Amino acid sequence: MGIREEQFMKEALIEAEKAGAIQEVPIGAVIVMDDEIIARAHNLRETSQNAITHAETLAIQEACEKLGTWRLEGAELYVTLEPCPMCSGAIILSRIEKVVYGAKDPKAGCAGTLMNLLEDDRFNHQCEVLPGVLSEECGGILSRFFKGLRDRKKSEKKKRMDSL
């Protein structure tokens, strides 16, 4: 892991902060080609009420539109949380060359934690995977978000019980 990877992961963290600010799970992604960010996105699943509007899929869509092709050969995806099965499939299908992620996802991680779809040679495309870049920062934003969510739910429950 180098300064370059940390620099682009910090950009993904900016996207994650945007998601958290609108009460979305704070996950952010950027796609880089030739050392330039060509797409950026954050989770919008709650806002859109659409299960596929993860940061990775939205960034892939933006990059494809910008480049005018579905083939993102030579692209690198930086994402704050390890990709899920759906996003891993989209990464493979879009031919992204490298995936750099921050925090591991013990419940849905498909870039090495539960399984590794991205480097599986049974598919017609594999990605290089670099895990753990700024993992503390990436995990911390998620932990703070979910703690806040639990605290809000607990407070709402207490208010309901007090009003009875």
Image: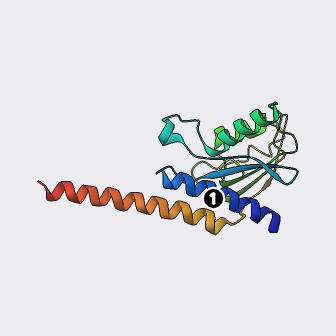
Q: Position of residue 47 (x, y in %)?
A: 48, 40
Residue lying at 77% horizontally and 45% vertically, measured from the top left? 118
Q: In which quarter of the image is residue 8?
A: bottom right
Residue at 80% over, 46% down: 119
Which quadrant is home to the N terminus? Answer: bottom right
* Residue 12 at x, y percent in the picture: 67, 56
SS under mark 1? helix
Q: What residue type is labelled 1?
A: Ile
Neighbours of disc 1 within 10 Å: few (<14), some (14-19), many (20+): many
> How far across and down, in percent of the image, does residue 14 sit?
63, 58
In the image, taking residue 55 as reference, residue 159 lies left or right, namely left
Q: Which of the two residues, 13 or 114, is positioned nearer the viewer here?
A: 13
Left or right of 155: which side holds 103?
A: right
Place residue 150 in its image quadrant. bottom left
Let me know if residue 1 appears in the view. no
How many badges with numbers are in the image?
A: 1
Residue of label 1:
14
